[in-house]
Image (cartoon, helix red, strand yellow):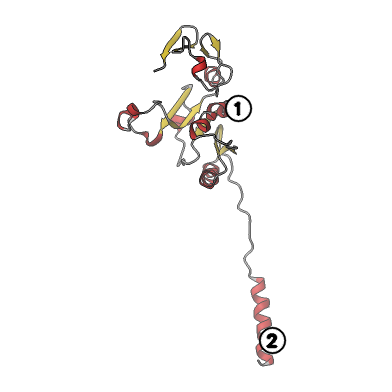
Amino acid sequence: MSNLDYQGGEVLAALESQFVPKLVAKPKPEITIKNAIVCSFYTSDDYYKSHGSRLRANLEELGIEVDLREITKKEGEDWAAICRKKVGFIAEVCAANPDKKVFWIDVDCELFSIPDFILNSTADIIGFQRGFSNPTKIGYENRGRFWEPCFWGINNTPQARKMIQGGGVALNKEKLEDPSQLITTTNLVNDKFLVVQKGKKNYFLLSAE
């Protein structure tokens, strides 16, 4: 190699060092939706954790505040047990955000926008099931529960907060203190019935088959 080649290599290396692209952290999108917060949780397995990262980026891009948390899945805990934690989790987010509408979205879903009729809804509670399809067309007659919302919201009205905190519901004449309480056969009257009261005048008698 000639001395000219060597010097030329040094010059080229010096020039390249001046044009190395600088890594600039992308600024966090500004929160433009001030009257609401979206929450969800996910377990630590790769599937849900990756969806959690995607959903956080999705919601931040929409300009809405996010409360997205990783929860611990206990040994032997199944999918239904994880789902039962939703109401208690949402109640906690509501308590921390008394002046905002609180929306839940399943972590493996995505929001393209939040329409004004949802953000400014006067309803106490709203919800949409997966696919926004007709319940009679998706097999609910063969399932143990009828309503399976992937996106639902709790308004900041007193009635909505009372409902999510469980203050407006009683089981067998006893106030439901924990909204995530698991109802078992020990709650049944005469090993068969469950009396549910909503407010002062609405009673429902459920029969376990």
Q: Name the amino acid, label 1.
A: Glu
- Ranked by sequence position, the earlier of labels 1 and 2 is 2
Q: Is residue 124 left or right of residue 7?
A: left
Q: Quadrant of the N terminus?
A: bottom right
Count residues near mark 2 (Cα–Cα under 10 Å), then give few for <14, some for 14-19, many for 20+.
Answer: few
Q: Is residue 139 left or right of residue 46?
A: left
Q: Percent from the top left, x then y, of residue 156?
A: 55, 23
Residue 52, above or below 174: below
Q: For the residues labelled 1 and 2, say whether their Cβ atoms are less than 8 Å apart.
A: no
Residue closer to the observer: 47 or 159: 47
**What is the C-alpha distance between the residues marked 1 and 2?**
67 Å
Residue extending furthest left?
A: 137
- Position of 187 with respect to 20 (left or right) is left
Write down the residue under mark 1.
Answer: 92
Determine the residue located farthest toward the top in the rendered image: 201
Q: Which residue is mark 2?
A: 7
Which disc is residue 126 wearing? none
Q: Position of residue 144 (x, y in %)?
A: 40, 26
Query: Measuring 41% from the left and 14% from the top, which residue is drawn there?
Result: 207
Helix, strand or loop for disc 1: helix
In front: 140, or 207? Answer: 207
The residue positioned farthest toward the bottom in the image shown: 2
Residue at the location (52% across, 24% down)? 155
Q: In x, y percent, where is residue 187?
A: 51, 15
Image quadrant for the C terminus? Answer: top left
Question: What type is the residue that disc 2 sits on?
Answer: Gln
Q: Is residue 28 above or below residue 161?
A: below
